[in-house]
Image: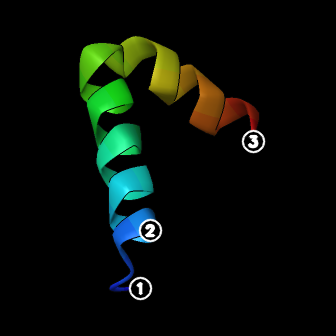
Amino acid sequence: PGSPEGKARLALNLFKASAAPEDSKENIKEK
């Protein structure tokens, strides 16, 4: 945590989740 790479990955995941909330919800349910 705190590393630029980690923050970028987190931001990307957040962006993907907000861009396709239904998709991310289904992915979380599967896993």
Q: Position of residue 21 (x, y in %)?
A: 34, 20
Residue 12 vs 15, above or below: the answer is: below
Q: How far apart in space, not on screen, are marks 1 and 2 (Cα)? A: 6 Å
Mark in front: 3 vs 2: 2
Q: Which residue is mark 1?
A: 1
Q: Which residue is mark 2?
A: 6
Q: Please say if the residues under marks 3 and 2 sit with CB atoms less than 8 Å apart.
A: no
Instruction: Give the mark nearer the N terminus: 3 vs 1.
Output: 1
Residue drawn 41% across the image and 41% down it: 13
Q: Which mark is residue 14?
A: none
Q: Position of residue 12 (x, y in %)?
A: 36, 40
Quadrant location of residue 31? top right
Q: How far apart in space, not on screen, are marks 3 and 2 (Cα)? A: 21 Å
Q: Position of residue 3 (x, y in %)?
A: 39, 80
Under mark 1, the amino acid is Pro
Instruction: Give the mark nearer the N terminus: 1 vs 2.
Output: 1
